[in-house]
Image (cartoon, rainbow, N blue to C red):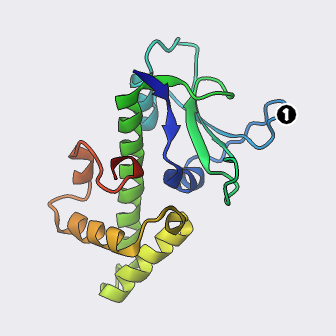
Amino acid sequence: MLVPAIIQPHLVPFLMDELSKEVLLPGDNKLLRVVRVHRNSSLGLFMYSNVPFLAPNKTLTLCFKPGKGMPRPYDYAYLSTGLAEPCMIKEESVRFLNDFLENMMRTAMVYYVLGRIKNHENKQEVHRGIECFMQRYELYDYDFDMEQYRQMYYRTISASGLLRRFQRYRTKLTKSSR
């Protein structure tokens, strides 16, 4: 079954801040922000492989636009081959895409905290690092809490590798898996 390639809302602030800030203003849609996904990038190789029947001259974009009645300026994102509508892909591919982006965000959080506590590793610094990351990417607004990320952080650093998370099939804390 084909479904719209919508990105989970809690990932939007992270993706907008960490991906290229390219902005296109097509016609009257001045609020739309677009990040072109390059075919040969790591992200592009993953995304293009999940979009069936994409013509070689078509480019995928991550589109960010305001959600209706949402408190933040941008709360809605989708993968598109144009600008107006999300592309239609397999439901499983949407899940894979969101899991991949979730893993990117969580890995960034672990490295963010590790960098922050480099010379002062204690529970208070870990707590402050996670709190700063959650505030920066507005995760409190999406019903995530400190304890979830604290547990994930300690599980990750006690594992044999920090990128081990990418070897898992599904993430555990995403909204779609709750």
Q: Residue at x 36, y 88 (%)?
A: 124
| Residue 31 image position (x, y, % from top left) | 77, 44
Q: Residue at x 54, y 53 (%)?
A: 18
Q: Residue at x 42, y 33 (%)?
A: 94
**In which quadrant of the rendered image does the N terminus lie?**
top left
Q: Is residue 29 left or right of residue 35?
A: right
Above or below for 74 versus 54? below
Element type at mark 1: loop
Front in this rendered view, residue 101 or 22: 101
What amino acid is labelled 1 in the image? Asp
| Residue 133 image position (x, y, % from top left) | 48, 69
Which residue is label 1 attached to?
Answer: 28
Above or below for 44 versus 157? above
Task: Decide if residue 120 is in sight here.
Answer: no
How busy is the neighbourhood of tag 1: few (under 14 within 10 Å), some, or many (20 plus)? Answer: few
Front in this rendered view, residue 145 or 178: 178
> Which of the 4 image quadrants contains residue 95?
top left
Q: Is residue 132 left or right of residue 76?
A: left
Q: Residue furthest left?
A: 160
| Residue 86 image position (x, y, % from top left) | 58, 29
Above or below for 128 versus 57? below
Front in this rendered view, residue 176 or 80: 176
Q: How many marks?
A: 1
| Residue 19 image position (x, y, % from top left) | 56, 48
Q: Is residue 31 left or right of residue 43?
A: right
Q: Residue at x 42, y 55 (%)?
A: 105
Task: Decide if residue 140 is in sight here.
Answer: yes
Front in this rendered view, residue 15 or 114: 15
Above or below for 61 versus 156? above
Q: Is residue 138 left or right of residue 97?
A: right
